[in-house]
Image: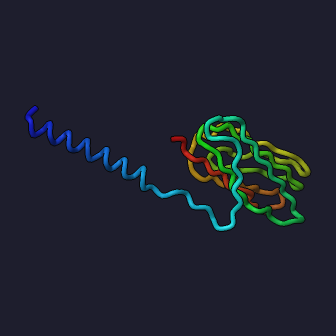
Amino acid sequence: MQFSSVRTVLWGGFSLVLLAGGYLVARPKPVLPQGAPVIEQGSASAMPLKTFSLRVASKNGAPASPVFRVGERDEVEIDVKSDQAGLLMLHGYSDGVPVAKEGEAKIRFTATHTGRFPLHMHAAAGSHLELATLEVLPRN
């Protein structure tokens, strides 16, 4: 390999390192919808089970849609109590968990995908309720 080829490879590698470092420093931070409640549990260093609870009551309309924030690789459990029957869907993590009228359902998983994932319910009466958003943040 000639000296000019080695120099070209070294400059290319150096440029890639600079670009990657610049992205990590300047990347945009997640933005929450204005007024959305954020619920965080546990510490970033330990990865205990993180449990969140929701209650679906048809007489009160759709519940406030909180954001459940966890870290990548956290163990997560979402408990839902409902006064109506339906199917719970957590996009990216669950294909559907049935919940009986006046019943409870649990969705338990390891947060392996980063991003924002909606949790909603298809009620037996035909309604569609947005319940919460799961936000999985990457570990550094």
In this orientation, which residue lies closer to the viewer: 80 or 5?
5
Q: Who is closer to the viewer here, 31 or 84?
A: 31
Residue farthest toward the right in the current orientation of the protein: 102
Residue 54 at x, y = what percent? 80, 52
Quadrant housing the N terminus: top left
Q: Who's the residue at 52% across and 57% down the image? A: 29
Instruction: Give above or below for 100 relative to 128.
Output: above
Q: Residue 16 in the image: state x and y as whole percent.
A: 29, 45
Quarter assignment of residue 42: top right
Q: Quadrant of residue 107?
A: top right
Q: Residue furthest top?
A: 1
The quarter holding residue 38 reads bottom right
Residue at 57 percent across and 50 percent down: it is 115
Q: Position of residue 84 (x, y in %)?
A: 87, 55
Residue positioned 76% across, 61% down in the render: 129
Task: Tell me how many marks there are.
Answer: 0
Colouring convention used in this rendered image of the protein:
rainbow
At 66% from the left edge and 55% from the top edge, which residue is drawn? 118
- Which of the two residues, 22 or 80, is positioned nearer the viewer here? 22
Image location of residue 86, percent across then percent down:
81, 53
Above or below, comparing residue 29 to residue 43 in the picture: below
